[in-house]
Image: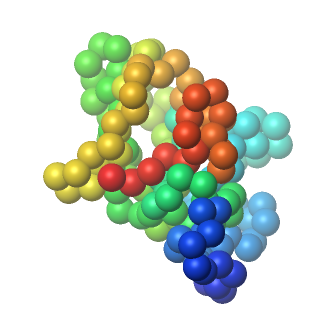
Amino acid sequence: MDTSSSSGGSDPNACVSDMWWTMGNEESPDMRPGGDCIGCHADEHEGPTFLVAGTVYSAPHEPDDCNGVGGLTVELVGADGAVHTLTTRSSGNFFAEVGEFELMLPYTAAVVDGDQRREMVGEQLITNCASCHTQQGLVMAPGRIIAP
């Protein structure tokens, strides 16, 4: 992982961590933060098959391959009330493989940091977080998943 700096100032599209994934498709649970983990693994027919995956960032418009925020809890609550928690890696990536647990749709999602939490506005049917939480945001997402 490269820790070279390429941003600064008040650029809203800056990489807040100033740490970048530079190893291409080198296999790692920290690879390609911000990218579409579920879609890429399905397209390439490599790596684990994910039930849910995404990256948590400090700011809403950070670029792909920029490291996000590690050590946070991603909380998913299924329609059946079952609570599942995932911890973000140092890259900000979080994921659960198919079969790791059952997530009944629709579900709610929140990012938790101690006593602070940021919840998604509504219930979700899509578990591929990066399909909406892109740098600029798609399908009503304002951008990245943001730490509280």
The residue positioned farthest toward the bottom in the image shown = 4
- Quadrant position of residue 100: top left
Across and down, in percent, residue 86 comes to 38, 46
Across and down, in percent, residue 129 comes to 56, 37
Residue visible at 22% across and 51% down in the picture: 116
Residue visible at 73% across and 37% down in the picture: 39
Quadrant containing the N terminus is bottom right
Across and down, in percent, residue 122 comes to 40, 22
Q: Is 7 displayed left or right of 148 in the figure?
A: right
Near-viewer residue (146 or 54):
146
- Quadrant position of residue 105: top left
Q: Is residue 41 above or below residue 88?
A: above
The residue positioned farthest toward the right in the image shown = 44
Q: Is residue 128 above or below residue 145?
A: above
The number of numbered discs placed on residues in the rendered structure image is 0
Q: Is 22 displayed left or right of 124 in the figure?
A: right
Q: Is 23 displayed left or right of 134 in the figure?
A: right
Q: Is residue 32 above or below residue 37?
A: below
Q: Is residue 55 visible?
A: no
Q: Is residue 76 visible?
A: yes
Q: Is residue 140 above or below residue 54?
A: above
Residue visible at 33% across and 52% down in the picture: 148
The residue positioned farthest toward the front in the image shown = 10
**Coloration mode:** rainbow
Across and down, in percent, residue 75 comes to 33, 38
